[in-house]
C-alpha cells in the first residue's frame, strides 16, 4: 500500500459521500498546506463533506504533499484559506495544475478558481487577482447556492459564468470591480462595479441556525491525532475591539445542546476517544455546565477533552476537575494585558481579581498549568501598562504557587471589519516584547512571544489592497522573510504605497478602505462608534484623542 493510499485509508468518515452521477462536475477542493494540517481544519472538513454529499459533483482533495486522483479537466478549483502566508502554496498548486496564476490570464479551458475561509472573508483584496471568485461568509448557506447557480451556467463562456455567479449573495467576483487610486502609490479613490448589473456591495453570508459544525472525518494522521471537533459557539459576545473572530462572525450563536451538541458528540465518540470543544468563548455557552455533566458520566471516563480559550470568570474548580478527569492538564485564557485601563480601551471585560481567582480555581481543581495570552502594542498602550502586566503575573504566581504559568504574547495587528482596523502596528512593540521577556524570565514565567516580523507581514496582508498581488508574486521568489518583503517593496517603489503605509500608519475613518465594497456584519458607521467608545475612557493618552476625526 502506498503512503498516499494508507493516509486516506486511515480516515473514519462521519458522513456518506454521494455517488457522483454520470454528468457530475469534476471539482478539486484544495487546502494549501500539508494533509495533516488541512485535515485538522474543521472548516475544510465541513466544506469537503458538503460538496461530497452532492451527486452532481465529483470531488477530489488536494494538499501540498498528497492528493486523491485528480481529474484531467476540472471545471471548478476551490481553496480553503486559513493562514495568510499559505498564499505561496496556492500559487504553487495552481502551477502544478497548469492553471495561470492570475485570473485575467485564464481561458474557458481553465477551471473557475474560487476560495473561501476566514482570511479571504476578512479581506480578499491582496489575493483578488489570483481568484475568479471568492465566497464571503458561512458555507452553510453559501455553498449550495453557489453550486446550484454554477450548474445553470456551466455551459456558458467564462465571462457569462462570472457575471451570473456575481448575482449570488456572498459571491464576489473581483474582476468585475474597478479600483481607482489618487496616484499609483496613493490612497484608493473609489471601488465600483463595472456596470449596474453587478452589485455595488457584496454582503458576507451569515448562518443563523443553532446546529453548528462538527468533524466529518477523524484520522490518526491529523496534526491533532484522532481528534473529533465540535463547534460549541460561533462568534463571541465580548466583542473585544481588535478581535476578528468576534466581529467578523457576529452575531454570537450557540449550538443547541439537544439538537446539535449531544448528538454530534455521540457520533464522534463512536470512533475516537479524543474530543475538542471549539469556539472563541466556549464556556459562555448558556448550558455549558449541563454539557460538562453529560461528559462526566462514567461511559466517557476514557475521553480526552480539549477546550479552546475560555473566559476568565467561567474557570471554576468543577471545570478544572472535569478537565483533569479527561486527561487535560492546562487551561487557556486570553487576558490581553494586566492593565485595567488598557483592557477598558479594548473592551476586555475582566479584572485582575478574576484572573487571580481563575488561577486559584485551576490549581484547586487539579490543573498543573495555566496559559495566559496577551498582546503588546495595543493602541493606547503605555510603559506603565507593561509594568501592570508583569505585576499581574507576579500576583498570579503568588496566588497559585506551584501552578505552571505560561504567558503567550502577540503584537497587535489591525484586522478588517473591526473597530481597530484604522490603527497601525506600533513599531515599539518589538522592544516591548523583549522587555516582557526579560521581566517575566526573572519571575519564572514561561514567555512565548509571537514573531514581531510575522506580525508586520500579517498586518500588510490584513490591510492590503489588490496592488499587492504583483508584490506577493515577487516575494515568493525572494523567500518568506520580512527582508524579502522590504526588498520587493523597493522593486515596486512608486507603483504601490510603501510598507509603512499599509502596516504602521493610522488611517482616517473617512478613508476608502480596500474592503469597503465588501459588507461585514456591522456597517462602517457602527465600527466608528465602537472606535469612539474605545477612545474615550478615563486617562486616555492624548495621542489617541480624536482619531476618528483625523486624517492620514
Image (cartoon, helix red, strand yellow):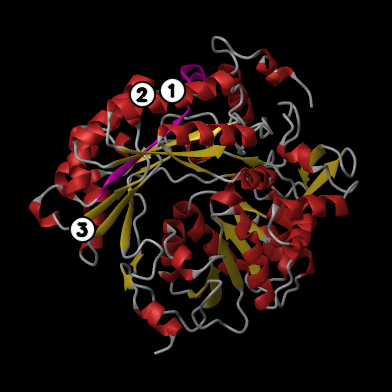
Q: Position of residue 285 (x, y in %)?
A: 30, 37
Q: Where is residue 456 in the image (x, y as percent from the top left)?
A: 67, 43
Mark yes or no: residue 530 visible. Answer: yes
**Residue that label 2 marks:** 395
Residue at 68% of width from left, 67% of height from top? 91
> Secondary structure under badge 2?
helix
453 or 294: nearer the viewer: 453
**Residue that label 1 marks:** 391
Q: Where is residue 155 in the image (x, y as percent from the top left)?
A: 65, 74
Compared with residue 520, is residue 84 higher up or lower down, i.e. above or below? below
Is residue 118 inside the magenta stretch? no
Residue at 82% of width from left, 37% of height from top? 187
Distance from the alpha carbon under mark 1 to that under mark 3: 44 Å
> Secondary structure under badge 1?
helix
Residue at 20% of width from left, 51% of height from top? 326
Distance from the alpha carbon under mark 1 to that under mark 2: 6 Å
Mark with earlier residue (1, 3)? 3
The reply to whether discs 1 and 3 touch (Cβ–Cβ < 8 Å) is: no
Mark yes or no: residue 170 visible. Answer: no
Q: Mark 3: give few (<14), some (14-19) or many (20+) Cα within 10 Å.
A: few
**Residue that label 3 marks:** 266
> Quadrant location of residue 64?
bottom right
276 or 109: nearer the viewer: 276
Q: Mark 2: give few (<14), some (14-19) or many (20+) Cα within 10 Å.
A: some
Q: Which of marks 1 and 3 is in front?
A: 1
The reply to whether discs 1 and 2 touch (Cβ–Cβ < 8 Å) is: yes
* Magenta span of residues: 328-344
Is residue 342 inside the magenta stretch? yes
Q: Where is residue 390 in the image (x, y as percent from the top left)?
A: 46, 26
Q: Which of marks 2 and 3 is in front?
A: 2
> Quadrant location of residue 533?
top right
Amino acid at each position: 500500500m502506498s503512503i498516499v493510499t494508507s493516509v486516506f485509508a486511515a480516515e473514519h468518515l462521519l458522513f456518506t459521500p454521494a455517488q457522483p452521477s454520470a454528468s457530475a462536475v469534476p471539482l478539486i477542493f484544495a487546502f494549501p498546506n500539508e494533509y495533516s494540517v488541512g485535515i485538522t481544519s474543521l472548516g475544510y472538513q465541513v466544506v469537503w463533506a458538503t460538496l461530497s454529499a452532492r451527486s452532481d459533483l465529483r470531488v477530489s482533495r488536494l494538499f501540498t504533499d498528497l492528493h486523491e486522483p485528480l481529474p484531467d479537466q476540472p471545471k471548478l478549483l476551490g481553496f480553503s484559506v486559513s493562514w495568510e502566508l499559505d498564499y505561496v502554496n496556492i500559487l504553487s498548486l495552481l502551477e502544478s495544475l497548469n492553471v495561470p496564476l492570475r485570473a485575467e490570464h485564464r481561458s474557458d479551458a481553465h477551471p473557475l478558481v474560487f476560495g473561501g475561509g476566514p482570511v479571504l472573508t476578512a479581506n480578499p483584496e491582496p489575493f483578488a487577482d489570483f481568484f475568479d471568485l471568492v465566497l464571503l461568509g458561512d458555507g452553510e448557506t453559501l455553498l449550495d447556492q453557489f453550486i446550484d447557480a454554477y450548474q445553470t451556467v456551466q455551459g456558458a463562456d467564462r465571462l457569462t459564468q462570472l457575471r451570473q455567479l456575481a448575482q449570488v449573495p456572498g459571491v464576489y467576483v473581483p474582476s468585475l470591480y474597478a479600483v481607482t487610486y489618487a496616484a499609483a502609490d496613493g490612497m484608493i479613490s473609489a471601488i465600483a462595479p463595472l456596470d449596474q448589473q453587478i452589485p455595488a456591495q457584496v454582503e458576507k453570508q451569515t448562518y443563523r441556525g443553532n446546529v453548528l459544525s462538527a468533524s466529518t472525518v477523524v484520522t490518526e494522521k491529523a496534526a491533532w491525532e484522532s481528534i473529533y471537533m465540535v463547534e460549541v459557539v460561533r462568534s463571541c459576545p465580548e466583542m473585544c475591539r481588535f478581535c476578528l473572530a468576534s466581529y467578523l462572525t457576529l452575531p454570537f450563536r450557540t449550538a443547541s445542546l439537544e439538537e446539535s451538541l449531544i448528538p454530534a458528540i455521540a457520533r464522534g465518540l463512536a470512533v475516537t476517544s479524543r474530543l475538542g470543544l471549539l469556539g472563541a468563548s466556549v464556556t459562555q455557552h448558556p448550558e455549558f455546565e449541563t454539557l460538562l455533566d453529560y461528559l462526566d458520566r462514567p461511559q466517557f471516563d476514557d475521553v480526552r477533552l480539549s477546550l479552546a480559550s475560555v473566559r476568565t470568570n467561567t474557570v471554576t474548580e468543577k471545570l478544572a476537575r472535569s478537565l483533569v478527569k479527561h486527561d487535560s492538564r492546562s487551561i487557556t485564557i486570553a487576558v490581553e494585558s494586566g492593565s485595567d485601563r488598557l483592557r477598558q480601551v479594548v473592551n476586555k471585560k475582566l479584572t485582575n481579581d478574576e484572573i487571580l481567582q481563575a488561577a486559584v480555581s485551576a490549581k484547586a481543581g487539579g490543573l498543573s498549568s495555566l496559559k495566559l495570552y496577551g498582546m503588546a502594542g495595543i493602541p493606547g498602550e503605555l510603559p506603565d501598562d507593561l509594568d501592570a502586566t508583569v505585576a499581574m503575573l507576579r500576583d498570579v504566581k503568588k496566588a497559585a504557587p506551584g501552578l505552571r504559568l505560561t504567558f503567550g504574547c502577540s503584537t497587535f495587528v489591525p484586522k478588517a471589519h473591526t473597530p481597530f482596523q484604522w490603527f497601525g502596528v506600533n513599531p515599539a512593540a518589538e522592544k516591548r516584547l523583549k522587555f516582557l521577556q526579560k521581566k517575566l524570565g526573572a519571575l519564572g514565567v514561561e514567555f512565548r512571544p509571537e514573531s514581531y516580523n510575522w506580525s508586520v507581514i500579517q498586518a500588510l496582508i490584513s490591510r492590503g489592497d489588490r496592488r499587492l498581488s504583483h508584490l506577493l508574486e515577487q516575494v515568493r521568489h525572494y523567500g518568506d522573510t520580512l527582508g524579502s518583503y522590504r526588498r520587493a517593496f523597493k522593486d515596486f517603489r512608486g507603483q504601490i504605497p510603501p510598507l509603512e503605509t499599509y502596516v504602521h500608519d493610522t488611517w482616517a475613518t473617512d478613508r476608502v478602505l480596500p474592503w469597503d465594497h465588501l459588507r461585514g456584519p456591522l456597517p462602517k458607521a457602527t465600527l466608528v462608534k465602537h472606535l469612539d467608545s474605545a477612545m474615550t475612557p478615563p486617562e486616555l493618552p492624548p495621542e489617541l484623542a480624536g482619531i476618528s476625526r483625523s486624517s492620514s
